[in-house]
Image (cartoon, rainbow, N blue to C red):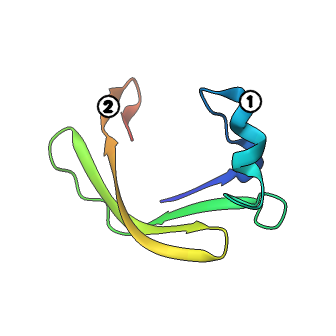
């Protein structure tokens, strides 16, 4: 499982703060344009799915575990 997002695409509930968060003090979107989560083993536990992996932001990559919700769809299951 790999999820990538452009750092400049960050949206906040307070739009006036978006540029500050995209700037050098936070995500530094100009120098580090892509945020990336790379999941390892995805193991189902009921409706929730813990997804351990690594999160790369700026110049750091850290181990994290996210939680996804598993839902039924017409063509199978979606995560």
Look at 82% across and 67% down and name the residue there: 31
Horizontal and vertical percent position of residue 76: 36, 34
Question: Between marks 2 and 1, how big is the CA–CA gap?
Answer: 35 Å
Number of numbered discs overlaid on the protein picture: 2
Does residue 61 appear to the left or right of 6 in the view shown? Answer: left
Near mark 2 (Cα within 10 A), the count class, few <14, some 14-19 or many ≥20, is few
Disc marking residue 50: none
Disc 1 on helix, strand or loop? helix
Circle 2 sits on which residue?
A: 71
> Given this view, does label 2 or label 1 mark the residue nearer the observer?
1
Does residue 76 appear to the left or right of 57 in the view shown? Answer: left
Look at 76% across and 66% down and name the residue there: 32
Horizontal and vertical percent position of residue 10: 68, 41
Disc 2 on helix, strand or loop? strand
Whichever of labels 2 and 1 marks the residue nearer the N terminus, that label is 1
Cβ atoms at labels 2 and 1 below 8 Å apart: no
As drawn, 50 above or below 47: below
Quarter that holds the C terminus: top left
The part of the image, by quadrant, that contains residue 53 is: bottom left
As drawn, 53 above or below 48: below
Q: Which of 28 and 57 is in front in this view?
A: 28
Horizontal and vertical percent position of residue 35: 64, 59
**Residue found farthest to the right:** 30
Circle 1 sits on which residue?
A: 16
Near mark 1 (Cα within 10 A), the count class, few <14, some 14-19 or many ≥20, is few
């Amino acid at each position: 499982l790999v999820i990538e997002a452009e750092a400049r695409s960050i949206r906040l509930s307070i739009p006036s703060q978006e540029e500050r968060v995209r700037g050098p003090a936070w995500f530094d979107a100009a120098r580090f344009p892509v945020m990336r989560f790379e999941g390892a083993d995805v193991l189902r536990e009921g409706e929730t799915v813990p997804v351990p992996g690594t999160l790369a932001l700026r110049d750091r990559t850290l181990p994290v575990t996210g939680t996804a919700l598993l839902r039924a769809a017409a063509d199978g299951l979606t995560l």
